[in-house]
Image (cartoon, grey):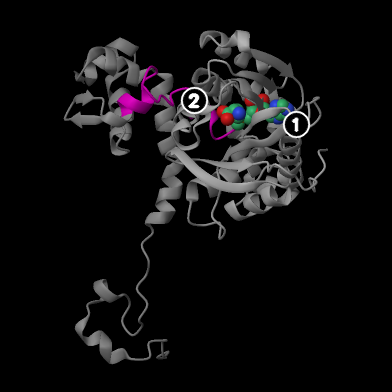
Amino acid sequence: MFEPRDAPYPELKKTHTMAHSGRPWTDFKPPPAAPVWAAIEGLGRYYILLASIELDLFDTIQRLGPTSVEKISAEIGAPVDHVRSLLDGVVAQGLLDQFVDVYELNDTAKRYLVSDGPATMADLVAVAPGPHENWTRLAETVRNGRPATPIEDDPVAFYVPLVEGTFTTMFRCATRADLKIRYSALAAPRVLDLGAGGAPWAIAILKGCPNGTAVVNDLPGVIQVAERKVGEHGVADRCELRPGDFHTIEIEPDTYDIVVLGHICRTEGEEGAKALISRAFDALKPEGRLLLADYFPDMERKFNPHAVIMGTTMMASTERGFTFTHKQFSEWLTDAGFARVRLIEPIGFQQTFVATKPRSTPPSTHQAG
Ligand SMILES: C[S@@+](CC[C@H](N)C(=O)[O-])C[C@H]1O[C@@H](n2cnc3c(N)ncnc32)[C@H](O)[C@@H]1O
């Protein structure tokens, strides 16, 4: 039997083919399946890149110059057909250039994927999504409200490679931040860098301020990365390493010109993030500034997919982790007593709140816990 469909003006369809306007007698054109395929292929795209880095393909092509698949295969000791298939998967993602059987680094690969690229992410690719097995158990994590193996179970194993991998980007961000906030104009700033990782912020600020000094905090076992990095950058003599939990280590009140919370709030949940903001406020001198870097979704949580998916990544692998919006952080900073709250983006996708402790300070409303 003929079932009337939902097109109210079927005569409009007379000039449209089915391919153009969808099924006859409806004004509904089926959407493409491309977003679903993009999600399915996401897994393959990621592992193609990861395998290429593990096999040293980018560094090998850098060494050989534009070169044939046979030479690359011989260099890494793997069968030609398999190497070609992998390389073509990299080319399909726009991460290599190729002409028939000759492969060549493109600008993206030179900058981000060779191990000595100026903004290399080569060490970051394996660790950035968090422990891979947590992704295979995401539905279970959502159901239980907790991942089976959160990174908090073994933070040293997770954070040491992570902060090694993020150092280049964060150091560049921290160095470029001087153009926006002029920390280098401070005569002898005292800096507190909580959860410092490799201490990219403390190092950048100390390099910009030859008379500055810093207290660098991280967990025992991770702080060794900072210890090595401050040595490599020649600022070790101006750094005090203070290992321990950033929620409970002793912090001098009214002492610091700059406190850095660099990518540490998003593992702490709302209460933990507010407690860190409160600790930063108490530690700052009047007119001192908090630098709070993270990934912040917009207030509708949909216009910056990078920050939104970072939040899901936190949910997948941490006990309390979520990303929080610009609006939430602005309110928490203001509630804690900060003034002149602004947002800078020293490099693409790396945003930092800058907030000042006013001269006469209302009492902080959040307690560190
Ligand atoms: C995402 S990394 C950020 C590193 C660095 N601040 C940056 O901006 O690149 C988070 C850091 O916080 C540290 N961390 C996590 N929980 C901590 C805690 N309870 N106390 C001190 N450090 C902690 C980790 O070891 C890691 O180095």
Tell me the distance, in whole angstroms, between the alpha carbons under discs 1 and 2: 26 Å
Q: What residue type is labelled 2?
A: Phe
Q: Which of marks 1 and 2 is in front?
A: 1
The answer to which of 254 and 113 lies nearer the viewer is 254
Residue at (75%, 31%) from the top-left corner?
254
- Say whether residue 242 is left or right of residue 93: right
**Label 1 neighbour load within 10 Å: few <14, some 14-19, many 20+:** some
Look at the image and say whether residue 129 sits in the magenta stretch: yes
Image coordinates of residue 204 in percent, x first then y, are 51, 22
Q: What residue type is labelled 1?
A: Asp
> Where on the image, by quarter, is ligand 1?
top right
Q: What element carries label 2?
A: helix
Which residue bears the numbered disc 2?
A: 171
Provide the residue span drawn in magenta: 109-130
Look at the image and say whether residue 78 sits in the magenta stretch: no
Which residue bears the numbered disc 1?
A: 254
Image coordinates of residue 250 in percent, x first then y, are 81, 25
Residue 180, above or below 83: below
Q: Quadrant of residue 90?
A: top left
The answer to which of 258 and 6 lies nearer the viewer is 258
